Image (cartoon, rainbow, N blue to C red):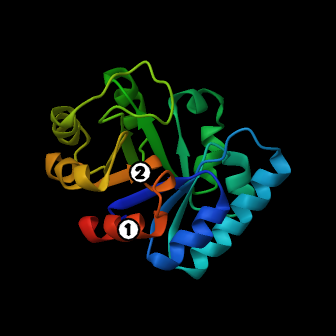
């Protein structure tokens, strides 16, 4: 299966309800610090929305709920990997995307047969404090050579204006958060993203 090159990440299912009708085909739901009942309801609703719009839903972090709700894709950060039950995830048939920031994390991720690898932050990001500085486009090219046929996701500081450069550098997919969610017209911005990535 070929994943779409535009990969937005949202922190609430209400974003999916707004953006999936515009043609988003690959989306991550990344919810933090909410009660489990709300998270479960959001993931269930997101899965239904994605089925309706023929889109791929990637659940961030909540592997047990993803299994319970019959989801197909899961994204884990390096810290999440330490706590996740990888045999249970594999047994459930979930495809796994992994965050990486340095060579050791890349080696670990590749050993787990990931469905994709995310490299970040490519550019400085305002989303979260990180100990890693921007990786830059040369790192994208270097890592694509290392991961081979595994899809490479560029994330961190992404914008419509930077998307084509990241793809030309070797990323297969560009992931974005604040360039959409903080935009005064998120719908228009999503349309621009779709235009530059397809």
At 34% from the left edge and 24% from the top edge, which residue is drawn? 102
User: Which quadrant does the N terminus fall into?
Assistant: bottom left
Give the Cα distance between marks 2 and 1.
Answer: 27 Å
Q: In the image, which disc is placed on residue 179? A: 2
At 57% from the left edge and 61% from the top edge, which residue is drawn? 72
Q: Is residue 69 visible?
A: no
Report whether 109 appears left or right of 42: left
Report whether 27 appears left or right of 69: left
Number of numbered callouts drawn? 2
Q: In the image, which disc is placed on residue 1? A: 1
- Furthest residue to the front? 184
At 14% from the left edge and 52% from the top edge, which residue is drawn? 168
Q: Secondary structure at mark 1?
A: loop
Give whichever of discs 2 and 1 has the lower sequence position: 1
Image height of 154 relative to 135, above or below: below
User: Which quadrant does the C terminus fall into?
Assistant: bottom left
Q: Secondary structure at mark 2?
A: helix
Question: Disc 2 or disc 1, which is closer to the eye?
Answer: 2
Residue 61 pos. (x, y %): 62, 42
- Furthest residue to the top? 131
Residue 46 pos. (x, y %): 65, 66
């Amino acid at each position: 299966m070929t994943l779409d090159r535009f990969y937005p990440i949202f922190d609430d299912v209400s974003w999916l309800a707004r953006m999936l009708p515009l043609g988003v085909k690959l989306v991550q739901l990344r919810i933090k610090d909410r009660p489990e009942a709300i998270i479960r309801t959001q993931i269930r609703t997101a899965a239904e929305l994605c089925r309706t719009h023929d889109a791929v839903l990637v659940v961030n972090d909540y592997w047990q709920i993803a299994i319970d709700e019959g989801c197909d894709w899961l994204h884990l950060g390096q810290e999440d990997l330490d706590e996740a039950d990888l045999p249970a995830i594999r047994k459930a048939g979930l495809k796994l995307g992994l965050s990486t920031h340095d060579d050791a994390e890349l080696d670990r991720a590749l050993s787990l047969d990931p469905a994709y690898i995310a490299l970040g932050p490519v550019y400085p990001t305002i989303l979260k404090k990180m100990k890693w500085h921007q990786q830059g486009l040369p790192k994208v090219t270097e890592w694509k050579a290392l991961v081979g046929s595994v899809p490479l996701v560029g994330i961190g500081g992404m914008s419509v204006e930077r998307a084509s450069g990241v793809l030309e550098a070797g990323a297969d997919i560009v992931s974005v958060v604040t360039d959409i969610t903080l935009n005064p017209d998120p719908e228009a911005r999503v349309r621009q993203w779709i235009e530059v990535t397809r």
